[in-house]
Image (spheres, rainbow, N blue to C red):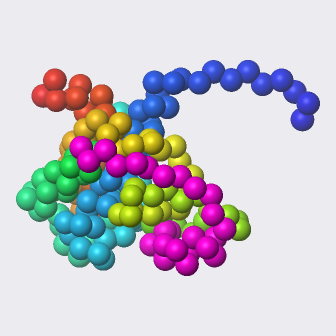
Amino acid sequence: KGGTVKLMLDVARRRQLTINHTSIHLINLSARKVLGEHVWQAGSSKTPEKAHLDITHYKTITEEETLEIEKNANELIQKSIKVKKELLPKDEAEKRYGMRLYQGGAVPGREIRVVSIADLEHEACGGTHLDNTRDAGRIIILNTERIQDGIDRITIKSGHVAEKYLDYS
């Protein structure tokens, strides 16, 4: 308390994390569209180099399903959809969007930050997000793997990191 703090923000790193974070929302939405409404987020991780989403699913994701998830996520990028962020009283958010809000788990407090991709996806999330899906650039699914019974991991690259990956592939 009362001290001085010097902050240096790595803008490029933060921007890539923002792209990866929004891209994971798009992958979650796309996985639910391709695999079914039973899909639920079981965890995620984002670094500047890549990100992954762990989802519930009753069988290993096939190569065809993986390609369809990637295609759908990139179509959402191309549609240039506004990403809305709003702070709402928890009870109002639950009435408006239901319990699917809690893909990442329960959120403490009386207010929650809701991230919405049009009327397609609404999730309680405190992370950094793009303002429009087009700013994600491109998503590449690197692989999917069964990490435990009923849980599959989808690993991605997005934005300029995805483009750079394609250049070296």
Which of the pair 131/150 is nearer the observer?
A: 131
Q: Does 73 sit left or right of 13 as displayed?
A: left
Residue 116 position by quadrant: bottom left
Q: Residue at point 31% right, 44% down?
A: 80
Q: Does 86 sit left or right of 79 as displayed?
A: right
In the rendered image, the quadrant that contains the N terminus is: top right
In this orientation, does residue 2 appear? yes
Which of the pair 116/147 is nearer the observer?
A: 116
Question: Which x, y percent locates residue 37?
Answer: 29, 75
Residue 86 position by quadrant: bottom right
1 w.r.t. 60: above or below: above
Specify the farthest residue to the right: 2
Question: Which x, y percent locates residue 119?
Answer: 38, 64
Question: Which x, y percent locates residue 113?
Answer: 59, 58
Q: Does 2 sit left or right of 42 as displayed?
A: right
Magenta span contains residue 93: yes
